[in-house]
Image (spheres, helix red, strand yellow):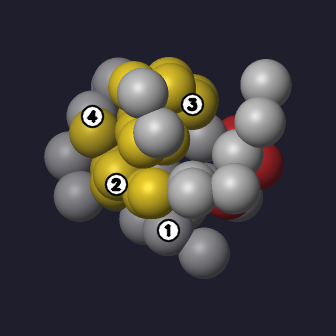
Amino acid sequence: MPTCKQCGSTLETADLVRHEAGDLLMVHCPECQRLMGTYREPGYNR
Ligand SMILES: [Zn+2]
């Protein structure tokens, strides 16, 4: 379970705000919008 290093929130993966950037998936903290991570989803289809 990820913890935001900026606001200290402990978050469920499902609660993260997701943004697609090409074939990358970026996830942000829903509380402070800090970038939490970037994931590659090679098999991702819209
Ligand atoms: Zn945060």
Q: Position of residue 34 (x, y in %)?
A: 27, 34
Q: Position of residue 13 (x, y in %)?
A: 67, 57
Labels 1, 2: front one: 2
**Element under label 4?**
loop
Q: Are marks 1 and 2 in contact (CB under 8 Å)?
A: yes
* Residue type indicated by callout 3: Arg
- The residue to which callout 3 is attached is 18
Which is nearer the eye, 21 or 16?
A: 21
* Residue type indicated by callout 2: Gly
* Residue type indicated by callout 1: Pro
Residue 37 got which mark? 2
* Residue type indicated by callout 4: Arg
- The residue to which callout 1 is attached is 2
Labels 4, 2: front one: 2
Q: Is mark 4 within 8 Å of ligand 1?
A: yes
Residue sitting at x 79%, y 25%:
46
Count residues near mark 2 (Cα–Cα under 10 Å), then give few for <14, some for 14-19, many for 20+: few
Q: Earlier in the sequence, mark 2 or mark 3?
A: 3
Name the image quarter holding residue 26: top left
For the residues marked 4 and 2, what is the alpha-carbon distance in whole angstroms?
Answer: 9 Å
Count residues near mark 4 (Cα–Cα under 10 Å), then give few for <14, some for 14-19, many for 20+: some
For the residues marked 4 and 1, what is the alpha-carbon distance in whole angstroms?
Answer: 12 Å
Q: Earlier in the sequence, mark 4 or mark 1?
A: 1
- The residue to which callout 4 is attached is 34
**Element under label 1?**
loop
Labels 3, 1: front one: 3
